[in-house]
């Protein structure tokens, strides 16, 4: 039986495979995200209809609706949307690098490493902690802590290459250790500092400003450009990328098995 070949599309020096089903699913998800985005804007102490929200977004709303939507609620909604996109891309990258669908920044300890650094700087007053917060900021210090934890997990998992299962196991261990450090810091800290740390750990979209939205938006767009440039080096994490294991390829078992199974698998062909 002849294999089905997906049609290719070339635009100048860029070529890609055209998959109508993927395009359709993407359009449906984008429409659903836009609908939820508008619904989140319409909800509040001053209720606004969905049609009024859409009209205001396209510049045809009333002045009162424009003030409530554009000045009060739009920064909150856009911040949530941008952060959600960044989290989704980070999860996809982590799974592609680890070649494991269980991999995520929180499983690999990256989230816990950032949390441990942030809680340490919040709960330890004075000295070096205050100097770090005043010079680079709490968010930048937490980002450095997350990146440092990720690099530590990567180097510990390296053994003539990266194995996805080893990376996951070491990441879980690092995550448990960083979480234990965070819990210990919260237990020993003052109650006021604990409250501040909990607010930072949980996060909130309340009282977001346009300045914060622009910082998150441009930062996410810049990183998306970098990801797009190196995306072809990382295959999506699917069952095809998870199988066969390296030991099966080295022994030749997978190649011999495929020659027998190619004609009858998958069964729905």
Image (tube, rainbow, N blue to C red):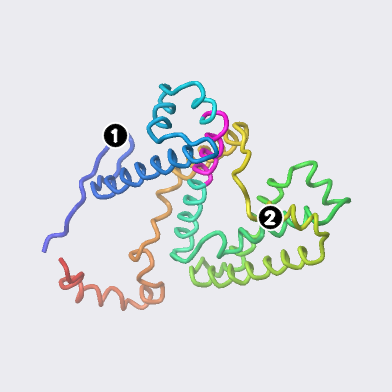
Residue 44 or residue 254, whichever sits in front: 44
Residue ranking furthest to the left: 1
In the rendered image, the quadrant that contains the N terminus is bottom left
Residue 90: x percent and y percent? 51, 52
Residue 261 or residue 30, whichever sits in front: 30
Identify the secondary structure beneath mark 2: helix
Magenta part of the protein: which range? 70-83
Marks 2 and 1, how far apart in space? 41 Å
Tell me, yes or no, whether the highlighted magenta stretch contains residue 75: yes
Identify the secondary structure beneath mark 1: strand
Residue 212: x percent and y percent? 62, 36
Tell me, yes or no, whether the highlighted magenta stretch contains residue 165: no
Q: Residue at x 60, y 35 (%)?
A: 215
Which of the two labelled residues, at mark 2 and mark 1, occupies the earlier sequence position? 1
Q: Image quarter for residue 38?
A: top left
- Label 1, on which residue? 11
- Label 2, on which residue? 145
Residue 110: x percent and y percent? 61, 59
Residue contact between numbered discs 2 and 1, judged by CB atoms under 8 Å: no
The image shows a total of numbered marks equal to 2
Q: Is residue 256 above or below residue 36?
A: below
Residue 39 horizontal side relative to residue 77, left or right? left
Circle 2 or circle 1, nearest the eye = 2
Residue ranking furthest to the right: 127
């Amino acid at each position: 039986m002849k294999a089905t070949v997906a049609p290719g599309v070339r635009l100048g020096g860029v070529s890609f495979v055209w998959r109508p089903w993927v395009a359709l699913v993407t359009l449906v998800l984008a429409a659903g995200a836009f609908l939820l985005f508008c619904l989140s804007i319409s909800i509040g102490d001053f209720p606004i209809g969905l049609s009024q929200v859409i009209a205001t977004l396209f510049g045809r709303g009333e002045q009162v609706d424009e003030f409530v939507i554009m000045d009060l609620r739009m920064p909150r909604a856009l911040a949530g949307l941008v952060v959600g996109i960044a989290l989704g891309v980070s999860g996809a990258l982590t799974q592609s690098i680890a070649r494991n669908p269980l991999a995520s920044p929180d499983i690999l300890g990256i989230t816990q490493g950032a949390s441990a650094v942030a809680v340490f700087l919040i709960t330890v007053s004075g000295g070096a902690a205050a100097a770090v917060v005043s010079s680079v900021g709490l968010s930048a210090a937490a980002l450095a802590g997350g990146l440092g934890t990720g690099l530590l997990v990567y180097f510990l998992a390296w053994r003539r290459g990266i194995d996805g299962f080893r990376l996951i196991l070491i990441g879980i261990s690092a995550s448990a250790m960083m979480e234990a450090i965070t819990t210990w810091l919260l237990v020993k800290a003052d109650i006021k500092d604990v409250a501040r740390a909990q607010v930072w750990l949980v996060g909130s979209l309340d009282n977001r400003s346009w300045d914060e939205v622009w910082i998150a938006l441009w930062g996410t767009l810049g990183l998306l450009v970098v990801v797009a440039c190196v995306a072809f080096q990382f295959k999506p994490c699917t069952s095809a990328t998870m199988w066969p294991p390296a030991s099966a390829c080295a022994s030749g078992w997978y190649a011999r098995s495929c020659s027998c199974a190619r004609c009858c698998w998958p069964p729905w062909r």
